[in-house]
Amino acid sequence: MSTDTAPKLIEGRTGPWEIVLGLEVHAQVASNAKLFSGAAVGFGAGPNEQVSLVDAAMPGMLPVINRRCVEQAVKTGLGLKAKINTWSRFDRKNYFYPDLPQGYQISQYKDPIVGEGQIEVERDDGSTFTVRIERLHLEQDAGKSIHDMDPNATYVDLNRAGTALMEIVSFPDMRSPEEAAAYVKKLRTILIYLGTCDGDLEKGNLRADVNVSVCRPGDYEKFRETGSFSHLGTRCEIKNVNSYRYIQQAIEYEARRQVEILEDGGKIDQETRLFDPNKGETRSMRSKEEAHDYRYFPDPDLLPLELDPAWIKQIEASLPELPDDKRARLKAQYGLSHYDAGVLIIDQARADYFERAAKGRDAKLVANWVTNELLARLAKDGLEIEQSPIPSDDVAGLVQLLEENVISSKIAKEVFEHMWAGEGTPAQIVEARGLKQVTDTGALEALIDKLIAANPGQAAQVKEKPQAIGWFVGQVMRETQGKANPAAVNEILRAKLS
Ligand code: ADP
Ligand code: MG
């Protein structure tokens, strides 16, 4: 079986090694309430303000499944082109921790709500690869222990306890730190398009556990042929990495650490590790021997989850256009390059802005203005496209002035600056500032005659070297403050000088 992976090689003393990566991404479900209680979900509430009796695990409290969270999981599964399981079940994963009042986490173990799917991911160079999704299941998040508020005490904030998470487990189909980061980026884009997760890494509503192993060239292909994990090296899992940069640094460090151990004749312990961004290192958190026995069993307080196929169809019909489809459509409908379309679909608002501005205009020109000038300006001021001081109508207006030869592209840049400063529509700015292109050939001819008469030496040169005409073009532009129509200027000059 051929794969489209591009493994990153690590040169060891004993020969080359390859990296193998599988990710477990925890995505907080976008929902107003928790998975099994009516308590609010939100960022920025005071400590323990969003805790119901269920979340606090008071005796006798019973969980009630939140339909909205189930719907979001199904929607996500459909967006990942995955199998939706009409029968799934919740299990208790038992462990003791102060931020887990129930003493167990409700999760899905053997029978998740979503089965196998896949995602197309783009590398930085524009090439693509496929990451297979193994499963997606729903589970509760835990609360938070706060160790740094008091030297003698640990505080517990249960606001997050019981919040719905989707754990999205990939197959080990990523082969370099860059591919792992690109996968999380793509997954995030899809979730945001679907509206099923806010995808804010800083707020922790998207976090990745990164599984890393190394193997010799050829072993991964055997794994893909047979499906047997025994061809792969032992993995270590790096918990809760929450930035693209940390994901890459952690993998880089961890893969090298494993190669060193193996080359010294050692063995990799399957363990859970933590990444320390300050040191750029991973360190052991717990090894497999100390691994918890979670004593999973079906939660007796919850019935199995049975989904009506008609409801799934209804959710499917409500899916928005997804990033890959949008990209293909923008390329086909507007003739955009793969790259430009890729830049525009990074978020829906960008693509919408472009499509509003492109209506009836030269779409490629509109795409140029949006992807170059506008996005650069927005980035410089740290603004999102929704906050753009220039409305899409005005980009359309600017492109119209260019199409109609009212202004040159050089002047258009100047007009753009005034648009950014809020001086009005492009047409108003051109009018008020007298930036209209001079296409009046009579006026241009008079000016050119004057220039030729004043510079006979330069004029003679043009007869020998036609490129020297550029000097005169420059002079005309200077005299007209850039407003002369370049095509008209060239034509008149050629007629007079050759
Ligand atoms: P666990 O509950 O132990 O974390 P999961 O099945 O939830 O196990 O997730 C295991 C993750 O590790 C998956 O993303 C899988 O693709 C990945 N994985 C499994 N074996 C390897 C390996 N040898 N190298 C890298 N990743 C691996
Ligand atoms: Mg897991």
Image (cartoon, grey):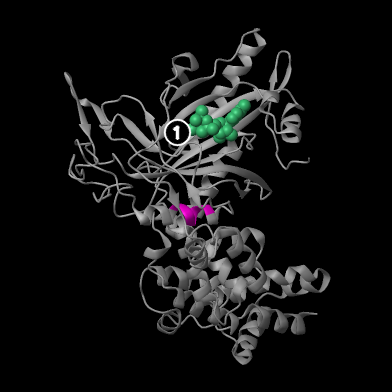
Vertical side of 476 occupied by 6: above or below: above
Element on which disc 1 rests? strand
Q: Which residue range is magenta in the image? A: 73-77
Q: Quadrant of the C terminus?
A: bottom right
Q: Is residue 383 left or right of residue 316?
A: left
| 74 part of magenta stretch | yes
Q: Is residue 398 left or right of residue 451?
A: left
Residue, x 49% and y 74% (percent of image)? 395
* Pick the front one: 279 or 107: 107
Q: How many marks?
A: 1
Q: Is residue 196 visible?
A: no
| Magenta stretch, main secondary structure class | helix
Q: Quadrant of residue 421?
A: bottom left
Q: Quadrant of residue 131?
A: top right
- Inspect the image, locate mark 1, and give the three-letter code of the amino acid beneath it: Val
Q: Is residue 184 left or right of residue 148?
A: right
Extreme top residue here?
265
Residue, x 43% and y 63% (percent of image)? 385
Q: Is residue 13 visible?
A: yes
Residue, x 68% and y 24% (percent of image)? 230
Q: Position of residue 369 (x, y in %)?
A: 54, 68
Q: Quadrant of the N terminus?
A: top right
Residue, x 39% and y 49% (percent of image)? 29
